[in-house]
Amino acid sequence: MRDYLGHMSQDEVPWDMETIRDIRIRLLAFFDSAKRPLPWREEPEPYRILVSEVMSQQTRLDTVVPYYRKWLERFPDLESLSRATEEEVLALWQGLGYYSRARNLLKAAREAVAEYGGALPRDPEGLQRLPGVGPYTAGAVASIAFGAAVPAVDGNVRRVLSRLTATPEPRPATLRSWAQALVDPQRPGDFNQALMELGSQQCTPRSPACDSCALLAFCSAGPAGTPEEYPRARAPSPVLHLKEAVPILVRFLEDQGPSLWMRRRPDEGLLAGMWEFPGVRVERKKEVRSAALTEATRLVAGAWTLSPPNGAVLDPVTHVFSHLKITYHPVLFLLVREVETETAGEDRERRQGSRHEGSWMSAERVEEHPIPVAQQKLMALALERAAG
Ligand code: SF4
């Protein structure tokens, strides 16, 4: 049934059984001929599917594949992952972004070992009780790894269903009930992957390939020439833009390479538990040098001489997070001479004893720690300048 604008009612499943059967046949044939050879498809074991699904959230598949291989080499099963430290897990994840996914994967593995004898629950409800597993991931794992006839609605599936039915703003519950009606009970995992694959290969956000689409005969928006009107774009939320002055302290000790002063972020919030340079928030770019100098002076507390005295301002690095953008303005200070006094020594020990304040990190061994991408860029800039 359609409303006065011609939009499909969201309260009912818009296809009869015969149409649903045809859609399944067409879509599975498309999948059999067009599916990409992804490593987790070779061996769709539950843990592997969970890892691939968590990694694929908000990340392109060609980026995910090398991370997935590296992860499986290091943590081949739930048991080995459950024994890892958070630091190890974050270090392996670095570069993929959205680090809470890695922390949740670790917690889920520990919970699976402690509560479920080292296996994942088989049903979507049980899966959703694991940290970081929402309805989509639970549906994907249950259908692909355990053959449960349940839906898995991600952004690709939302777009395809919205266009098939010409529904501009389908509700999440509606999408789930439509996807549940469509899912093939014989091959639920393949069917769900087929819908996602169609969304990423054919029914793309811009210029979808309707002429060669397996579902053209069942689609409302495609033949009408209006697919890009569906689903209606959500108003983008405003992005906050912050600036940080980042003093980068580099010291050279005899017979050693450079080391850098870094601190560990708190256990909660953005980039939790990762390592960074000690940035301070500034309102304007012209405050960068003095803010960095104040912070650098506080950190070395008279134990070292800074060179150059006011620091060398390097090129800024901007990183966009999901909800905010931060421009980091690095200022390099080389520590050239130690004037060790008892008080300064004690001060330094005290600061190094504080988990969030910081410590010296050898540039050679820095990769053993989880460091966000933007901070890695700052480090590369600083080390290049320090060597030059
Ligand atoms: S016909 Fe076009 S709009 Fe409809 S599902 Fe296929 S690609 Fe998407």
Image (cartoon, rainbow, N blue to C red):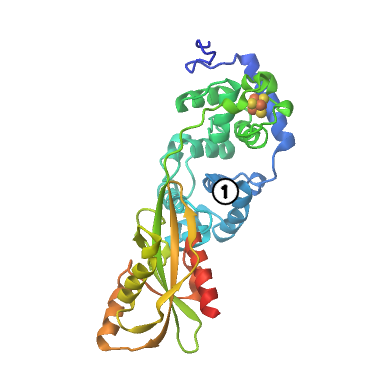
Image position of 69 with respect to 311: above or below:
above
Please state the horizontal and vertical placement of residue 47, each as a whole percent of the image.
Answer: 54, 48
View quadrant of ligand 1:
top right
On screen, residue 300 versus residue 130, left or right, reads left
Dot 1 corresponds to which residue? 48
Question: Image quarter for residue 53?
Answer: top right
Q: Position of residue 212 (x, y in %)?
A: 74, 28
Q: Identify which residue, 95 or 42, lies in the foreground.
A: 95
**71 sits left or right of 304 in the view:** right
Residue 153: percent from the left, percent from the top? Answer: 53, 32
How many neighbours does mark 1 have within 10 angstroms: few (below 14), some (14-19), or many (20 or more)? many
Image-quadrant location for residue 293: bottom left
Q: Residue at x 65, y 14 (%)?
A: 18
Looking at this view, is 2 or 79 the one in front?
Answer: 2
Q: Residue at x 44, y 67 (%)?
A: 330
In the image, taking residue 1 as reference, residue 347 lies left or right, namely left
Q: Is residue 226 visible?
A: yes
Name the element at disc 1: helix
Q: Nearer the viewer, residue 228 or 267?
A: 228
Above or below 62: residue 9 = above
Q: Is residue 88 above or below residue 215?
A: below
